Image (cartoon, grey):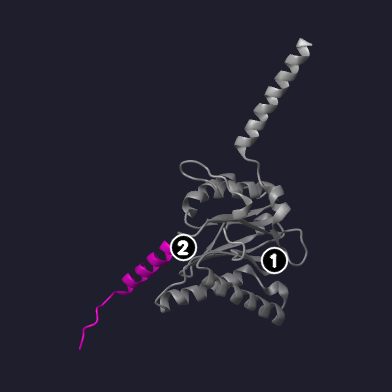
């Protein structure tokens, strides 16, 4: 009879955590932040069909990174749960906190009982009557819930990017200002900032003033209008304008 190798429970959990973190860290980043107009989701996503940001219920949004089929299963389960609770009781009884607890229970059970943990990190956010009443919950692969203070970043460079968004975040900022901060944060780099274009952006907002369903995707011309102008181009245009003015003044003097 062959002898089975013994592995301690602590080592099994460490191995699962390392496996999940390693794979999640490969994901592109997602920024979630509260502003005066609502809760803004900005994700770097090269796929036009596989979304990272969704609506869960009337005033509740969902964002995720990691393995698509795994977080898609969690998203659909959350939608069904929200619909069932809203139908059985009242739509106002469906909250981000209750959905986050359900996700935490599911992720925790999978992490401890299955061989392979889910390679996902989730955000469940609910827009409130004012920015400081917004609720943002971050859920990790092992079922831990982290309530966030109005902003956070998920993805491979989250630890480096969160300081950038922390410095610039303001609950009083409008949608355009919050979007500019999110794009600048996604483009931040240790050596030099990179330009983020609309073809790799997925953007949505839970609009505070919107009655009923608050979720709205921002695409096409609306997204182009929000995009901040490149600083280098702006400076070049400004310098060109100055040169033109100088030439105009000079010719006026000559005449």
Q: What residue is drawn where x is 67% and y is 30%?
A: 238
Residue picked out by circle 2: 24
Q: Is residue 42 above or below residue 108?
A: above
- Which residue shows up at 55% across the image and 55% down it? 152
For the residue labelled by badge 2, is the local secondary structure a helix, a strand or a loop? helix
Q: What is the span of residues highlighted in magenta in the rendered image?
A: 1-24
Q: What residue is pinned by disc 1? A: 59
For the N terminus, the image quarter is bottom left
Q: Left or right: 232 with respect to 141? A: right
Q: Does the magenta-highlighted stretch encompass residue 94? A: no
Q: Picture coordinates of residue 154 (x, y %)?
A: 52, 58
Relative image position of residue 73 (x, y in whole percent): 56, 75
Quadrant containing the C terminus is top right
Give me the disc on residue 124: none
Asked whether, in this view, residue 170 is left or right of residue 27, the answer is right
Q: Distance between the Cα atoms at labels 2 and 1?
A: 27 Å
């Amino acid at each position: 009879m062959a002898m089975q190798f013994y592995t301690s429970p602590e080592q099994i959990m460490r191995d699962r955590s390392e496996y999940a973190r390693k794979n999640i860290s490969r994901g592109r980043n997602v920024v979630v932040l509260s502003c005066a107009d609502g809760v803004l989701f900005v994700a770097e996503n090269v796929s036009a069909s596989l979304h990272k940001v969704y609506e869960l219920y009337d005033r509740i949004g969902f964002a995720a990174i990691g393995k698509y089929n795994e977080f898609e299963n969690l998203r659909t389960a959350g939608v069904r749960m929200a619909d069932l609770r809203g139908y059985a009781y009242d739509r106002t009884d469906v909250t981000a906190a209750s959905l986050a607890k359900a996700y935490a229970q599911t992720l925790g059970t999978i992490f401890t009982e299955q061989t392979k943990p889910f390679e996902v990190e989730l955000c469940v956010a609910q827009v409130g009557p004012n920015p400081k009443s917004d609720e943002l919950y971050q859920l990790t692969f092992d079922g831990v819930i982290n309530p966030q203070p109005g902003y956070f970043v998920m993805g491979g460079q989250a630890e480096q990017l969160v300081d950038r968004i922390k410095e610039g975040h303001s609950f009083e900022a409008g949608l355009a200002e919050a979007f500019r901060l999110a794009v600048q944060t996604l483009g931040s780099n240790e050596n030099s900032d990179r330009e983020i274009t609309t073809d790799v952006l997925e953007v949505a907002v839970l609009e505070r003033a919107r009655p009923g369903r608050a979720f709205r995707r921002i695409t096409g011309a609306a997204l182009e209008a929000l995009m901040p102008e490149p600083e280098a181009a702006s400076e070049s245009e400004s310098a060109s304008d100055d040169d033109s003015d100088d030439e105009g003044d000079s010719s006026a003097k000559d005449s």
